[in-house]
Amino acid sequence: MAPWDRMVWALPIIAAAGILHGEAAEEPRGFAGWLAHVCSPEMRRAEARLEWLSGELQKLPELSKTPFASRYGFRSEKLESRDDPQWVQIDLGRSCRIDRIAAMPAHIPALGKEGVGYGFPLRFSIEVSGDAGMKDAVTVVDRTGGDVGNPGRYPMIFGIDPTEARYIRFTATKHRPLDEGFFWALEELVVLSGNTSVATTRRTTASSSLELFPNWSMYRINDGQSELGMPVTIEKSPTKGYASAVANYLDTAEKWIEVDLGEEHAIDEVRLLPVVSGNFEMPGLRSFPRRWKIELANDPGFKHPVLLHRDQKSNTPGYPGRCSFSVPAFGQRGRYLRLVAQELWGADERAGFALAEIRVYSGGENVALGKPVRAKDQAETTGAEGWSPAAVVDGFSSTNRLIEYPGYLDLIERRGRLEGERERLMALRERKRNTAGKAIAYSGGGIGAATFLGFGWLLVRQRTMRNRAVTQLRNQIARDLHDDIGSNLGGIVLLSEIGSRHCENKQAREDFKTIREAAETTSQSMQDIVWLIERENVGLRELVTRMRRSAEALLGESRIALKVSPADFPDRSLSLFFRRHVFFAFKETINNVRRHSGATAVELSIWLDPDELRFEVRDNGCGFDPESASQSGHGLANLRSRAGRVKGGCDITSSPGKGTSVIFSAPFKSGRN
């Protein structure tokens, strides 16, 4: 038998072996992957390394995957010159011995890949000095000699020789292009002195700053909130922290928790870690206090306390989310430390607060670890569910074991390196598979087989190109909405705020207020649209979270009580068609409550059955006649239309003076899902 004939007869056997081998492997290779594995030693080494990398990455903590509201960080204004040096400077409050600096890149999920490492400067330097004018400044980081690659989601970490300084300046010397100008951005600048974070919440100045709060602000660069999250390992926590007793929402009595440090210490930093909980049943009861203060004293009765920090804002934007909150103490001395919750978040006439951990640093050491703790009161579930005052100093967050920032940054830096290596090896593996696929196509068993395979490959390639074009268009639309319309709306908000404050004419002030409210509402709606059109793989959990945030933004957390049943529901993928109609039906219902009901309390319920999603919005407002309201702009016809499109239902119950109930249902297997 001729060699060619033997090869033709052998092809089905080889193909079958390749398919069986692919099915047995962790990731199906197919025939092309199997052939590349057999023929390429480089491919085999890459696959072995990828398997090792997978095991190593499971041992390392991850960056936060959940964006904190619409907070992005610091961004310069649009600049005319690409090389005009622009800086941001932090006053540490006193001279500190700096030994490590981390520059965290900004991340805007709505922009897809273009939002990863958004605006990170191409060239930059970091200087420190004891003088605000940066006289005799020392350059501790110099990246001005060549362009710096985009670091992606991971921070650039610089260990430096310990240097005494009070001021630290980050200077961008080459910026990223933006439309017809240039800009640069950072999410967070972390400055460490040993184990303590010395730059958090300190005074900041900048040569140029885009002030579009809450998205961009000069003060975001050191507010302690970033995707770095809390400094933890992968070890799970046996406890959750401290939870206060539930009080009446109108009760103005303060709650407190205090730590006896055992002896007097010179305190450098107090670090508070909030509870991280996905429990939808208790909004506001397992979170930071709404307004609070920290006191230090040498007597247990706190007769002559030293005030370390007082949060003056009743609705603070400083809620740390999944991050810690650092309070500098500048060497104040004391033995007893007390956190006083002066105003609490609440819902459904219930109020309370919780804390995962209190860390108190003196000389670089956490002197609060394992020390005695007292509290004014505690939740009835103390102990049974991992809640107790002692858990607030046990070295764990509500989810994982805590470690110090230097060690945590080392782990995050290692994870960034390993993930970068994994991406390169996966790209290599894909190239090898493609090469093997082409070899199969060229050496197939006859012209007919080669033609068939080539035709199939063209179909796949055309589909890929179409999908890529759609993705690029979606990202372009999202970017244009965010950068152009978002910036314009932010400018309208700022101008109308200034006008409402300084205009002497009462009617003009009211007009400015109306303009500001309309711009804020439009900006929120635009963010929702960007979220819908840009994000492809949105699951059920993210949709429910978005519905909750939307309700809180429109009505305020204090007016709503949200229940999700079951509380711990499995995630599942959802189509854009389903998400769009369900989410906008929910928002339209909430908007009706806000505009028309005059309600003081709103109950939101979401039921997640295996086959459908249902939500109910019930308020105690003025109510209406559904028959006459259908013609008066309440949008009831639109709600029923959306229900019909997803093959669901919409039941509206209301009467004058007796509130309103809207129940909307949508099967997961609706029309285009």
Image (cartoon, rainbow, N blue to C red):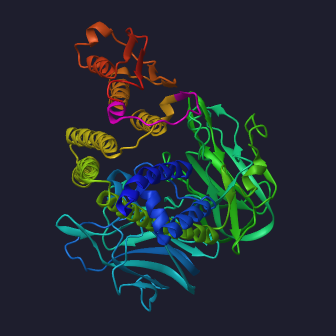
Q: Nearer the viewer, residue 358 or 54?
A: 54
Residue at left offset 24%, top offset 19%: 633
Side of 43 where 492 appears, left or right: left
Going by the picture, which residue comes out furthest to the front? 1
* Quadrant housing residue 533: top left
Residue at left offset 48%, top offset 30%: 559
565 drawn magenta: yes
Q: In x, y percent, where is residue 601?
A: 48, 24
* Quadrant housing residue 338: bottom right
Q: Nearer the viewer, residue 348 or 427?
A: 427
Instruction: Quarter of the image for the N terminus: give it.
Output: bottom left
Going by the picture, which residue comes out furthest to the left? 180
Q: Is residue 543 above or below residue 425?
A: above
* Span colored in magenta: 562-580
Instruction: Quarter of the image for the C terminus: give it.
Output: top left
Q: In x, y percent, where is residue 195?
A: 64, 72
Side of 73 where 329 appears, left or right: right
One can see residue 268 in this view: yes
Q: Nearer the viewer, residue 30 or 306?
A: 30
Q: In x, y percent, where is residue 340?
A: 66, 49
Residue at left offset 61%, top offset 68%: 405
521 drawn magenta: no
Q: How many marks?
A: 0
Going by the picture, which residue comes out furthest to the bottom? 136
Q: In x, y percent, where is residue 531?
A: 34, 44
Side of 472 where 288 appears, left or right: right
One can see residue 29 in this view: no
